[in-house]
Amino acid sequence: MWESLRNILTAYAAHDPVMGYVQSMNFIAAFLLLAGLAEEDAFWCLVALVDRVVPGYFSEGMAAAKLDQRLFTRLLHIHLPAVGLHLESLAPDNIVCGIISSQWLLTLFVNVLPTEATMRVWDCIFATKSRAPLFASCLALLEPHAFDVLGCSEMGEAIELLQGLGESMQPTD
């Protein structure tokens, strides 16, 4: 598997030499391989995800990823205002939201959700041809744990809680 992963990432860097390889791509490529895709299929799926689903996430300066982090923060304040205000009170400049949203969005949830849930999110992404399912997933992860988040009294505690939200998910049919 390690050889396949290296081949995919090297091929992507050759495919798009301006962008090259960016660290979060390894999680996505590894997830594709673990999901059973052949090397070439995993490569083309990575290309589709990076070029069509999250264009600009991995480019120099990561402008689109930063924009989506701000969008996540805004959506959080709209849909779960108490949580948004509380996280903002724990650290300046929405640092907590930035840390969590970058972990969730840049890896397209592969390090956050169970495999089946990640696949469902990706199905929705491909079906809608948009990133909207990523934001819906962020809010869906947070909503049932709003009370727990509100109980956090410092930034590190909140980040630790938020990083583990996907671990408690149970598969549904």
Image (spheres, rainbow, N blue to C red):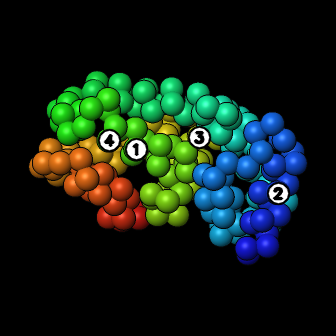
Q: In the figure, residue 89 lies in which quadrant?
A: top left
Q: In the figure, residue 43 lies in which quadrant?
A: bottom right
Q: In the figure, residue 170 lies in which quadrant?
A: bottom left
The residue indicated by pointer 4 is: 96
Q: Are marks 3 and 2 in contact (CB under 8 Å)?
A: no
Give the residue at x 73% y 73%. Answer: 2
Q: Residue 157, how many percent across, how many down?
A: 22, 55
The residue indicated by pointer 1 is: 99
Q: What whole-number distance in Å separates the C-alpha atoms at marks 4 and 3? A: 25 Å
Which amino acid type corresponds to the residue marked 3 in the rendered image? Ile
Give the residue at x 46% y 48%. Answer: 104
SS under mark 2 = helix
The residue indicated by pointer 2 is: 10
* Along the line of sight, the residue nearer the viewer: 78 or 56: 56
Which amino acid type corresponds to the residue marked 2 in the rendered image? Thr
Which amino acid type corresponds to the residue marked 4 in the rendered image? Val
